[in-house]
Image: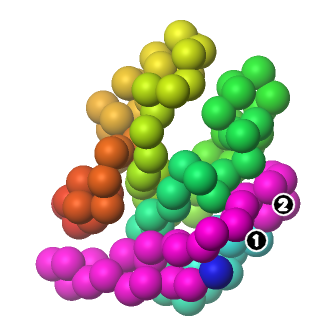
Amino acid sequence: MKIENHIVNNIKIAEIISEDFIIQSIEDGADLLGNLYYSDYDRIILYEKNLLPDFFNLKTGVAGEILQKFANFRVRLAIVGNFDKHKSNSLKQFIFESNKGKQVNFVDSLSQAIDCLAM
């Protein structure tokens, strides 16, 4: 795992780069959040391919547990990926509602992730 540091408008953003799953459990999400938070990051970019597939099955509760921890620490998150492949209507609605706010955004590209987190 590599952390790419982006600074935009004096805002420090961590882009997490890996070829492997980074978050395979709720504990992995909490550990990543804690490590980055204590490294002075309050904005993080993750890639869909690095998240456990259960994250995108809302019935498992994995996404809810992990995203609640981000909200509790007031750490903003952008997840980059192609979410059209997920057929769940509840996930599509969740993504739509999340993208209305600033806490968690689901975006198509790194540039979109940086733009939404830099505001």
Was residue 9 drawn as part of the magenta stretch in this picture?
yes
The residue at the point 35 percent across, 45 percent down is 107
Report the residue that reaches farthest toward the left: 9
Residue displayed at 46% across by 17% down = 93
Q: Position of residue 3 (x, y in %)?
A: 51, 84
Residue 73 locus on image (x, y percent): 58, 62
**Would you say 34 lies left or right of 119 here?**
right
In the rendered image, is residue 34 in sight?
A: yes
- According to the image, label 2 marks what residue? 27
Residue type indicated by callout 1: Asp
* Figure label count: 2
Label 1: state its secondary structure: helix
Magenta range: 2-28
- Horizontally, is 116 left or right of 9 in the view? right
23 or 37, which is in the foreground?
23
When the figure is inspected, residue 40 is found, relative to residue 90, above or below; the finding is: below
Quadrant occupied by the C terminus: bottom left
Residue 116: image quadrant is: bottom left
Residue to which mark 1 is pinned:
31
- Is 49 placed above or below 1 here? above
Label 2: element kind: helix
Identity of the residue furthest to the top in this view: 89
**Residue plotted at (84% across, 60% down):** 27
For residue 99, which numbered disc appears in the image? none
Residue 73, placed above or below residue 92: below
